[in-house]
Image (tube, rainbow, N blue to C red):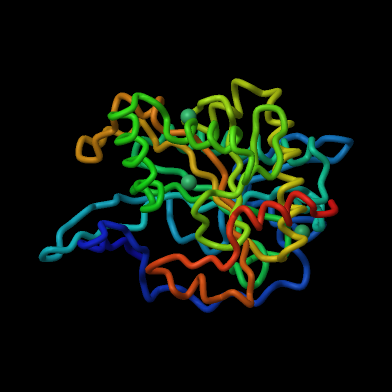
Amino acid sequence: MELRKDPITRSWVITGDDVGEPAPRPQACRFCGPSADLTNVIATLPGVDGSAWSARSVVHPQALYHIEGEAARRGDGLYDRMGSVGAHEVLLENPRHDGHIWNASDIEVEQFLRLAAQRIQDLKRDSRFKYVSIFKNHGEAAGQEFDHPTSQLTATIFVPRRVLYELRAGREYFESKERCVFCDILAQEERQNLRIVESRGDYVAFCPYAPRVPYETWIMPRSHESSFERTGSSRVGTLTDLAALLRRTLQRIRTVTEAFHLVLHTSPNSQHPSATLGYWKTLDDDYHWHIEILPILEAKARSYTFKEIYYSPVTSETAVQRLREAKI
Ligand SMILES: [Zn+2]
Ligand SMILES: [Zn+2]
Ligand SMILES: [Zn+2]
């Protein structure tokens, strides 16, 4: 595998012909029970309520990125390419094979969030990595890979395009207004109360004003904080509220559809000594971490295939009513 940069959009893609056939799904789960493979465990959080463990990170069995080696960025005429150096982990959200976020206890979800924060913090110590992504693809339409309840993590030597857009927009807004655009969005949403799904402690779930897909929902802390992993380590108590809100929001979304993508957007690695990327002094002031949930409505596949302009046949004001009233 290698990374190639699109010279027009400046986004990196990972490509290669060296991907084997996907392994047939094993009969027994590779992540739990007697058949669990413990050779590639990276981190484990202690159990709650008497279980041996609560959340665990393992090397992805078909990792797209590998921790060894040099990125060796090189030119190819006008193009840029580099090796697929990075990390690719599977985060086991729960020791139980059916312990999904939406039916786990808040303390279990909290442990998973804590593991996610620890893994990001740990990988950010490696100054080669510019960004650590955490995401979850659930349901066949979303490209779910494992039956066991899992999320995934990638540490990359580039910042993903969508995050880059957000970082640039956050910086520009801050330059002109000296305020965080995310804080301003949340303040207006709370004032108008047209698209708020639910709030819990410091956390708010809402449908964004211009959704990319029907029922798109974001979860954001009200207190300004650029990095999720810092929330995880310093304001420990509040993670319980986040766990409860995440669980309840996914319950609501599941009354509409089974399949969804979830992604955590946190600040890039400020340990990385990149001059060209120009990490700016106001990064901690102008960026604000959040979770984005993109449900997949199969009948509305049009909104996914036509990606030049997003088309969502349900406005956020309509979506929020259905999500608020969902029986959960
Ligand atoms: Zn399992
Ligand atoms: Zn903010
Ligand atoms: Zn985002």
Residue 205: image quadrant is top right
Residue 247 in view of the camera: yes
Q: Residue at x 61, y 42 (%)?
A: 219
Q: Residue at x 56, y 25 (%)?
A: 223
Residue 152 in view of the camera: no
Taking depth in this image into account, of 220 and 124 the one nearest to the observer is 220
Residue 126: image quadrant is top left
Q: Residue at x 35, y 46 (%)?
A: 164
- Percent x, y of residue 55: 71, 43
Taking depth in this image into account, of 253 and 151 the one nearest to the observer is 253
- Percent x, y of residue 310: 45, 65
Taking 65 as reference, is 301 left or right? right
Taking depth in this image into account, of 230 and 206 the one nearest to the observer is 206
Q: Which residue is situated farthest in the left direction here?
A: 77
What count of labels does the image hold?
A: 0
Instruction: Decide: is 50 above or below 26.
Output: above
Q: Residue at x 82, y 50 (%)?
A: 103
Taking depth in this image into account, of 150 and 240 the one nearest to the observer is 240
Instruction: Decide: is 214 above or below 25.
Output: above
- Percent x, y of residue 326: 80, 54
- Percent x, y of residue 198: 71, 40
